[in-house]
Image: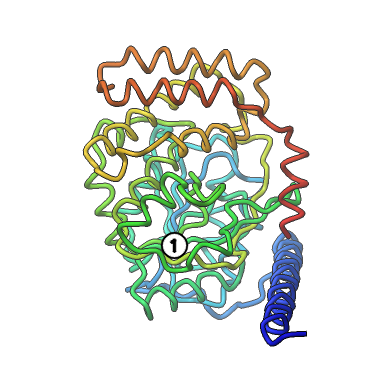
Amino acid sequence: MTKFEIIKYVSFIIIIFSRFCNINRISYEIYQLKKYYELCKEGILIRKNNFKKVDNPKISVIVPVYNREKYLLQFLRSIQNQYFNDIEIILVDDSSTDNSQEIIKKIKNEDERIILLKNKINKGTFISRNIAGLKAKGEYLIFPDPDDIVSPFVFDKCYHAAKKFNFELIRFHMYSDRKYVFSLIPEALPKIVSQPDLRTHLVYGFGYENITDGILNNKFVSKILFVTCLNSINEYYLKKKLIYFEDGIINFSFYQYAKSIYLYRIFGYYYFTNPDSISKEIKINSYFECFFVFLKFVFENTKNILIEKNMTFYFLHNYIKNNEILYKISNYSTIYKRVIKQISKSDFISPFFQQKLKSMELIISNLKLKKRNKVSNIAERKI
């Protein structure tokens, strides 16, 4: 065996071994996350001495709440059991009609860090988050949903990484109760992504499959970046009560304005498929009304950027292809074509994007959606 062949053979062994170690690390993290969920589900407090009010919190936890009485205790336990104590927890009761507010008040009596805001009328998740985010005192913000579980170490790890390297945005893996991972960051993508290539990879997905995401739950963001993004978003969008795509708008802004993004390959979040969630109801008219608003936002915020001149709507194609709600719509191709037709008539579409819409229509015509269980199996194989 030649020297070159030996080097090649050893390199191959190292690659296989590293991949094997990575698979085991991911499996172990998911196992730990599941165990932690069971503990929170029982309402168990691990850390009972960290509930004093913090005058200048380092992290603000922003949580809109609407009719989540079934899940609030286990969710709040997952926040209270964090290894990082220097936080404030801002809960926005969005005019709940169940006992959510009473549960919050009860837990608030034992935890001084909880701040309860109330909306007199239901304003939706997007507006409620923005209200709380602007009131937050923390250096960094995180936006979990009140029916999920947050890993006990994620605040600590994200904060120290952000402070040490001055990251404005951190993104991490998520795991679903349906036994698949999502928003998974490819190993091939560099951990630290800076301008100008972050827009290419993260906003439009160029070069990496399934790298785009419209999720806010797995983002750890500086307050400065959050305020910058809100100031950049037209008031038209900030006042819209969006049931769908609300996370997509703020994510799009984060990726555009963040000076440095860290892709943290840790599982920091356990996502639960809540059958009572308003976003799980298939209301075609409101869904596509929100979709048009989101598309309008994308067009308005890309038409003057040089790098998007080569864009092939990979981002929008990817977003549609992976959207869970659309898996339930059997006549998707007909609906998509109707969407394209209606968008083409809109007054905000320039001739350049008229041409791009034709390309998108061609992509949609050839699009074949896989069944959910097949996608789950693929995700599981990645583990």
Instruction: Report x, y in % for residue 89.
Output: 46, 61
Instruction: Report x, y in % for residue 291.
Output: 44, 27
When the figure is inspected, residue 94 is found, relative to residue 48, above or below; the finding is: above
Instruction: Report x, y in % for residue 367.
Output: 60, 27
Residue 184, picture quadrant: bottom right
Classify the position of the C terminus by image quarter: bottom right
When the figure is inspected, residue 210 is found, relative to residue 53, above or below; the finding is: above
Going by the numbered disc 1, the residue's amino acid type is Phe
Is 167 displayed left or right of 105 in the figure?
A: left
In front of the other: 368 or 347: 368
Colouring scheme applied when the structure was drawn: rainbow
Image point (59%, 37%), residue name: 322
When the figure is inspected, residue 67 is found, relative to residue 272, above or below; the finding is: above
Label 1 environment density (alpha carbons within 10 Å; few <14, some 14–19, many ≥20): many
Image point (43%, 33%), residue name: 122
Image point (31%, 16%), residue name: 346
Classify the position of the N terminus by image quarter: bottom right
In the picture as drawn, the residue positioned furthest to the front comes out as 2
Is 141 displayed left or right of 323 in the figure?
A: left
Q: Secondary structure at mark 1?
A: strand
Image point (54%, 53%), residue name: 104
- Give the residue at mark 1: 220
In front of the other: 243 or 296: 296
Instruction: Report x, y in % for residue 78.
Output: 61, 64
Number of labels in the image equals: 1
In front of the other: 110 or 225: 225
